[in-house]
Amino acid sequence: MIERWSEPGLGEHIVESLQLEIEDDGEFFRIQKEITELDSYLKKYGMKVSLSSGRNEKYTFKLDIAVDRLKRDAGKKRDYGSAKKVSDIFLYSNSHKSTEAAEYAGVQLRTYQRRVKKYKEENRWNEENTSFF
């Protein structure tokens, strides 16, 4: 039977539980080991599988799918850089090349150049600017 639940911060989940009858404990431990290995592969995709023992020699196989994690999460990732101040980067860039200054700032070269251009247009590319780069 499929069970659906959701909680803020945890997202939406779909859970399927199955009752299994396993003959002996050796077989149970072998299956549990395989399911644990399978769980390690599926965890990064938002799925969790488990096998637990219950009453009267009944075992429960449970499959938990986090619906929110099934998305691809594709798209451009933003490059925020490090927590350096504009004044620090300005002083560093006076004695170093642009590539070295970009590395010091913690951003890619093109991002560094774009931000420097923006600060120059706004007349904020100086050593008095204490805002974050």
Image: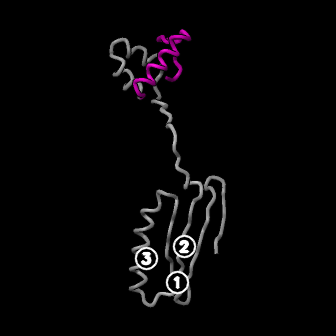
Per the image, label 2 sits on a secondary structure element best described as strand
Label 3: which residue?
A: 32
Badge 2 or badge 3: first in the primary sequence: 3
The single residue placed furthest to the top in the displayed view is: 123
Identity of the residue drawn at 52% across and 62% down: 47
Q: Is residue 132 magenta?
A: yes
What residue is disc 2 on? 62
Give the residue pinned by disc 1.
20
The residue under label 3 is which amino acid type?
Gln
Distance, label 1 to label 3, CA atoms, is 12 Å
Horizontal and vertical percent for residue 101?
37, 20
Query: Residue sitting at 43 percent across and 83 percent down?
Result: 28
Q: Does the stretch in magenta take in 9?
A: no
Q: Quadrant of the N terminus?
A: bottom right
Q: Which residues are magenta?
A: 107-133
Q: Tell which circle, 1 or 2, labels the residue nearer the N-terminal end.
A: 1
What SS does tag 3 mark?
helix
